[in-house]
Amino acid sequence: MTGASPAAAPPATGSRVLGLVGASWRPARPRMLVEAAAARLAAAHGIGTEVADLLDAGPGLGAFQRRDMDARAEALIAKVETAEALIIGCPVFQGGMPGLLKHLFDQAPEGALKGRPVLITACGGGLRHALVVEHQIRPLFGYFEALTCPTAVYAGTAELSDGAPAPALAERIEAAAAQLAALMAPRRTTGRRAA
Ligand SMILES: Cc1cc2nc3c(=O)[nH]c(=O)nc-3n(C[C@H](O)[C@H](O)[C@H](O)COP(=O)(O)O)c2cc1C
């Protein structure tokens, strides 16, 4: 990646950002996008991120209704609802977002993510479904009235095959991370004043 080196960056603070990886296996390439965005957010903007996998919720997430889910699933949903900002990363499944990831968000009440900054990433086998970030994932957060970063990040597996995002992809990640930091700035200022 280009830009400021981690050594010169201010210390990352807390885990106010939740990176949520919507893959159903580990390790998953979609997690690389979330981790790259989190690393950039820490290095250039001093903001810490906790990364969680959909797998952390366990099979209880598959219950039809939230009241029937177990503590593991509830804990992940609660993390999503209470995070200051989100970095979403998921694989493309059958031309869309994974159903179980959508199911998690289906449990959150209307308004749960209102005004929440969200950075969207997704990974597919190729480039054919690149617009899934715009046509499927962004509208979901539009429903919640969240504040999505204008730049969404999509990658085909080839762009993540060297163990790190390819240069053009890294530039998009940097842009999106800067947008997330900017969207978080008013809340951070308010939080500091309140502290
Ligand atoms: C059930 C399933 C459906 C998939 N459907 C698509 C698809 O429609 N379009 C696409 O580009 N990739 C598709 N893929 C590929 C995954 O998006 C891709 O493998 C993943 O993002 C890369 O992560 P990995 O390297 O950890 O597997 C599919 C994969 C699975 C398992």
Image: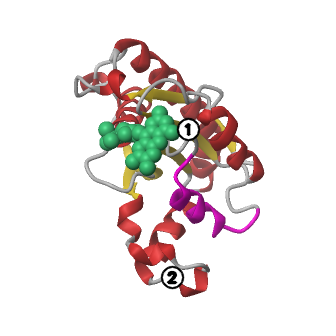
User: Which callout, 2 or 1, points to the residue nearer the camera?
Assistant: 2
Please provide percent x and percent y for residue 32. 33, 37
Residue at figure coordinates x 52%, y 21% from the top left: 175
SS label for mark 1: strand
Residue at figure coordinates x 53%, y 44% from the top left: 94
Indicate which disc residue 119 carries.
Answer: 1
Are there few (<14), some (14-19), or many (20+) residues within 10 Å of tag 1?
Answer: many
Please provide percent x and percent y for residue 99. 55, 58
Image quarter for residue 165? Answer: top left
The amino acid beneath tag 2 is Met
> Foreground residue, 147 or 153?
153
User: Ligand 1 within 8 A of label 2's CB?
Assistant: no
Indicate which disc residue 69 carries.
Answer: 2
Residue 184 relative to residue 89: left or right: right
Q: Residue 98: say if magenta.
A: yes
Q: Quadrant of the N terminus?
A: top left
Can residue 90 be seen at all in this image of the molecule? no
Can residue 135 be seen at all in this image of the molecule? yes
Residue at figure coordinates x 66%, y 42% from the top left: 136
Please provide percent x and percent y for residue 151. 60, 25
> Foreground residue, 172 or 126?
126
Protein image colouring: secondary structure
Residue at figure coordinates x 65%, y 65% from the top left: 106
Q: Residue 102: say if magenta.
A: yes
Q: Is residue 70 above or below residue 171?
A: below
SS label for mark 2: loop
Mark 2–mark 1 Cα distance, whole angstroms, equals: 27 Å
Magenta stretch?
Answer: 97-110
> Foreground residue, 46 or 112?
112
Indicate which disc residue 100 carries.
Answer: none
Q: Earlier in the sequence, mark 2 or mark 1?
A: 2
